[in-house]
């Protein structure tokens, strides 16, 4: 592994990565820059990257112009956490059953789950609305949490199933011979071994839930105090003007918790996604 | 106590019959080895005894009680798996303690029992390590430790040494024999390796394609195999089989003509028709150079130091293996005559059944088994 690349190969590699990252990160950079500018500078022609009067004033202003902002962020976080918990409570036992038990239509059911997740929420939003209406769940947190969980369960099942399948059946047989019940074995043997996998699934579910709550909230909720952040942000669209700078500041504040979470947990994600890929 | 009795036990997977009706009795304290080629149903048999597989028909009794429908933990058995099945997230102490934790035993008892097991298995230094930090032999011992603390009346082992290298396997064989001498429990041990069977067993059960071919002490199987399968499976290197034609029965035994070779009379019981197709079985150690014997040609020479193995080509083209002394001067390509003492030979009739031998070099009833010693 020493000096595998020549210097010009390294230059090419880094140039490629820089290009790629520029495309990926430019919107974030611009959003951050906009959030620092006064509103007049946002619309200035010609465009200037470093505008006059840049400051963090907008980050103070947003809490004043939209007093509900804190509530929205908490809603967003709370809904995503609730979706994650509910989704995992469904997907873990289901994935275990798919991985370990033989039953009729097992493979068919699994494909069905995947098919549902491929159709996606947007296509089903009208029937879902009818369903929520019938159940009297419109304008509640449940209306945003339950469909969110439902659409993350298939991926959860699929990921967890592959973790469970990697655990040798002999471990469970050994526990069974020693007198452990299925539940005891699940609690003391299977779940601890599958823990890295569960962290990965939890994080991906959380991120998906955070991203997809917009659609459900927009459709199923009209109570402002229940809104998650992405919907709440629309209130920065005033009657005369759109306060882009404050909108960007609020967006960044809203995304920050997820970003922090990701940075802290990313080594689990990488480890979890590649675990078992190479023979140990 | 650990008496086991199988009566007419069978096992079907779907429509495939994997174990044909089997009757077997295993006495308390016996070290019994199930041996047979891969896929013959050894694991299935063991797993039925353990309670991990349903018994399709027949009854299994442990200590006189029918246990067909009891879960493993109620049968008084403990099992050691081929892959060891250690829990990777628990340290050695907790791995060994697992059955006791399941049973909610008091902490003091857990400590005392795990400590005692670790002492026997020389694992005291390793109790805080995770299985991933142990060598193969140590993992094996942890798996055995987990079985010991349950104080079962019957130990079940499924190919426990097959993941170890040859040197370690030899050591573990000796350790297992010692353990058996110390604990004096019934042990049922599954292996495809006839050397493990010969070295450790009080009694060997030879299985083939889901049937018991023969049950007996190692020397019984070696000197009195009941059929060609057992004769070929037990003993290393494998027994040679020479096609022969029967010439009738005489008071001295059965006379026959070895194909492309001399006529001999083998001292065995039974009648053989003139012209019957027979197989003559001779162990490689029982062959010796003899200018008047079967004319062969040396093909490969393996020098092991204390002995030399010669692989020869017989006149009909078949291979014959011979074990001779380490100082032989035989070289590949050389012509060699192979002779043997008729008393040492085995004779198999058409369906592979052996005719009982009149002379056996050892008094089988007076050789002590490992247990009685
Ligand atoms: N769960 C199962 N389903 C179907 N067939 C099986 C199953 N387990 C084992 N068998 C078959 O039973 C036979 C005996 O297997 P096994 O007892 O594992 O053999 P051994 O341990 O002697 O190598 C094999 O032919 C195997 O294919
Ligand atoms: Mg097996």
Image (tube, rainbow, N blue to C red):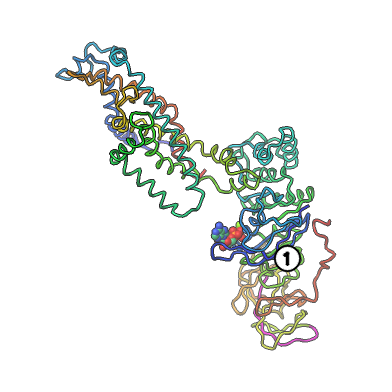
Q: Position of residue B259 (x, y in %)?
A: 64, 82
Q: Main secondary structure of the magenta part?
A: strand
Q: Position of residue A114 (x, y in %)?
A: 37, 46
Please indicate whether residue A18 sits to the left or right of residue B91 in the image: left
Q: What residue is pinned by disc 1?
A: B215
Foreground: B197 or B10?
Answer: B10
| Image vertical order of residue B9 relative to residue A249, above or below | below
Residue at figure coordinates x 70%, y 73% from the top left: B282
- Tell which quarter ligand 1 is in: bottom right
Residue at figure coordinates x 36%, y 18% from the top left: A70
Please indicate whether residue B105 sits to the left or right of residue A236 in the image: right
Q: Residues within 10 Å of mark 1 (few under 14, many from 20)?
A: many
- The answer to if B241 sits in the magenta stretch is yes
Please indicate whether residue B343 sits to the left or right of residue A117 in the image: right
In terms of secondary structure, where does tag 1 sit? strand
Q: Position of residue B256 (x, y in %)?
A: 71, 84
Foreground: A4 or A213?
Answer: A213
Asked which quadrant contains residue A183, the reply is top right
User: Which residue is most to the right?
Assistant: B366
Range drawn in magenta: B239-252
Asked which quadrant contains residue A35, the reply is top left
């Amino acid at each position: 592994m020493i000096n595998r690349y020549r210097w010009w190969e390294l230059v090419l590699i880094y140039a490629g990565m820089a290009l790629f990252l520029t495309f990926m990160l430019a919107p974030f950079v611009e959003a951050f820059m906009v959030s620092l500018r006064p509103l007049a500078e946002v619309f200035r022609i010609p465009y200037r990257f470093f505008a006059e009067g840049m400051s963090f004033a907008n980050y103070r202003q947003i809490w004043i112009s939209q007093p509900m902002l804190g509530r929205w962020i908490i809603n967003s976080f709370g809904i995503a956490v609730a979706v994650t918990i509910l989704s995992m409570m469904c997907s873990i036992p289901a994935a275990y059953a798919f991985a370990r038990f033989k039953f009729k239509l097992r493979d068919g059911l699994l494909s069905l789950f995947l098919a549902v997740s491929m159709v996606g929420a947007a296509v089903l939003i009208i029937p879902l609305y009818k369903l929520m209406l019938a159940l009297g769940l419109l304008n509640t947190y449940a209306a945003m949490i339950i469909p969110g969980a439902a659409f993350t369960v298939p991926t959860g099942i699929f990921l967890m199933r592959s973790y469970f399948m990697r655990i040798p059946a002999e471990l469970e047989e050994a526990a069974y011979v020693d007198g452990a019940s299925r539940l005891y074995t699940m609690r003391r043997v299977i779940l601890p071994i599958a823990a890295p996998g569960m962290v990965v699934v939890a994080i991906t579910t959380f991120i998906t839930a955070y991203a997809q709550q917009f659609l459900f909230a927009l459709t199923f909720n009209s109570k402002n105090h229940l809104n998650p952040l992405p919907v709440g942000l629309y209130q920065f669209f005033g009657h005369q003007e759109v306060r882009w700078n404050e909108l960007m500041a609020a967006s960044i504040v809203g995304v920050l918790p997820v970003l922090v979470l990701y940075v802290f947990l990313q080594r689990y994600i990488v480890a979890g996604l590649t675990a078992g890929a190479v023979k140990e | 106590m650990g008496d086991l009795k199988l009566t007419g036990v069978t096992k079907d997977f779907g429509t495939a019959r994997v174990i044909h009706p089997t009757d077997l009795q295993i006495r308390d304290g016996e070290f019994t080895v199930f041996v047979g080629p891969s896929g013959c149903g050894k694991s299935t048999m063991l797993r039925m005894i353990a309670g991990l597989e349903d018994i399709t028909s027949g009854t299994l009794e442990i200590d006189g009680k029918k246990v067909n429908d009891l879960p493993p933990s109620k049968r008084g058995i403990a099992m050691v798996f081929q892959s060891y099945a250690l829990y990777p997230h628990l340290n050695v102490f907790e791995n060994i303690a697992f059955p006791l934790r399941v049973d909610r035993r008091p902490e003091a008892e857990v400590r005392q029992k795990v400590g005692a097991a670790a002492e026997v298995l020389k694992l005291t230094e390793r109790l805080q390590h995770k299985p991933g930090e142990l060598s193969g032999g140590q993992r094996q011992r942890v798996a055995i430790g987990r079985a010991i603390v349950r104080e079962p009346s019957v130990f079940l082992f499924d190919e426990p040494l097959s993941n170890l290298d040859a040197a370690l396997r030899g050591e573990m064989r000796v350790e297992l024999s010692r353990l058996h001498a110390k604990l004096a429990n019934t042990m049922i041990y599954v292996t495809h390796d006839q050397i493990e069977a010969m070295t450790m067993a009080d009694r060997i059960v030879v299985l083939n394609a889901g049937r018991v071919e023969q049950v007996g002490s190692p020397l019984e199987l070696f000197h009195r195999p009941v059929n060609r399968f057992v004769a070929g499976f037990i003993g290393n290197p494998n027994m040679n089989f020479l096609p022969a034609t029967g010439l009738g029965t005489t008071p001295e035994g059965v006379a026959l003509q070895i194909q492309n070779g001399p006529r001999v009379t083998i001292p065995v019981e039974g009648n053989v028709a003139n012209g019957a197709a027979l197989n003559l079985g001779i162990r490689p150690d029982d062959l010796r150079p003899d200018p008047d014997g079967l004319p062969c040609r040396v093909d490969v020479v393996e020098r092991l130091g204390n002995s030399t193995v010669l692989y020869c080509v017989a006149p009909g083209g078949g291979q014959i293996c011979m074990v001779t002394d380490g100082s032989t001067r035989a070289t590949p390509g050389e012509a060699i005559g192979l002779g043997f003492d008729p008393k040492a030979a085995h004779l198999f009739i058409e369906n592979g059944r052996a005719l009982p031998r009149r002379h056996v070099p050892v008094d089988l009833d007076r050789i002590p088994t490992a247990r009685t010693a």
